[in-house]
Image (cartoon, rainbow, N blue to C red):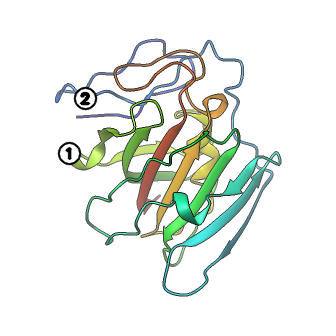
Amino acid sequence: MSRPYLRPWTLAVVIGAAGALGLAACSSSPSHSSASSNVASTSYNTGSGPSATTTTVNGAIAPIPTADLSPAGTAGTAPTLKIPSGTPPTELQSADLITGVGVEATSGDNVTVQYVLGTYSSGKVVQSSWTSQPFSFTLGAGQVIPGWDQGVVGMKLGGRRELIIPPSLGYGARSPGAGIAPNDTLVFVIDLLKIN
């Protein structure tokens, strides 16, 4: 079983039964703070393609440029991840590839997701829950990296969201394991399966 790196006070990298890298952040980075409840989200869809999502958490989330978006794919199947070329962004970027319906995830909700992770340093996928099992965590409780606590807020059930997470909201200067370099920029595609 692969588990995203737990944060913030876990120093060990979680290794699942399948030997996959987990997603735990190290507590030594001063930038790891809990997501604020001060979140505003605006989504817009220009038609049949993915919609860009602008989310403001402490003024730091921007839409992913259209040229950098991963393909939307099909709900219920593992997504294809596109790692953008060029200079990584310094702020959190977000886009809804598939817009969900109904309830939105809010801070304090227990959510279950599937995800694919790629890194700018490797230029490829380094982890996927699709090869093991979905992952559950409490949104906004500091159990995952700040980029997730901030970027998953506002997702609707059944939605697929891409997040490009700078080091300050990811793992910072510490490498939590293979495929993730110090000060790496992370690219996630996350499917929201359940909200409790």
Identify the residue shown where x is 41% and y is 59%. Answer: 191
Picture quadrant of residue 128 = top left
Q: Does residue 138 lie above or below 175 as drawn? A: below
Which residue occupies the extreme left position in the image? 18
- Answer whether labels 2 and 1 touch (C-beta < 8 Å): yes
- Please tell me whether residue 42 is drawn above or below residue 192 in the rendered image: below
Image coords of residue 68 (percent x, y): 53, 57
Mark 2 vs 1, N-terminal side = 2
Residue visible at 72% across and 51% down in the picture: 61
Q: Is residue 108 visible?
A: no
Residue ID at (70%, 38%): 90
Height in image: 179 above or below 59? above
Q: Residue at x 31, y 72 (%)?
A: 74
Which secondary structure, mark 2?
loop
For the residues labelled 2 and 1, the Cα–Cα distance comes to 9 Å
Q: Residue furthest bottom?
A: 47
Q: Position of residue 48 (x, y in %)?
A: 49, 86
Q: Position of residue 35 (x, y in %)?
A: 70, 41
Within-10-Å neighbours for mark 2: few <14, some 14–19, many 20+: many
Percent from the top left, x then y, of residue 3? 34, 34
90 sits to left or right of 136: right
Numbered circle sitting on residue 131: 1
Observer-nearest residue: 82 or 75?
82
Residue 98 vs residue 50, the one in the foreground: 50
Q: Amino acid at mark 1?
A: Thr
Mark 1: secondary structure: helix
Please state which amino acid type lies under the numbered disc 2: Ala
User: With 142 as the anchor, is 186 left or right in this view?
Assistant: left
Identify the disc placed on residue 20: 2
What quarter of the picture does the N terminus occupy?
top left
Relative to 22, is 140 on the left or the right?
right
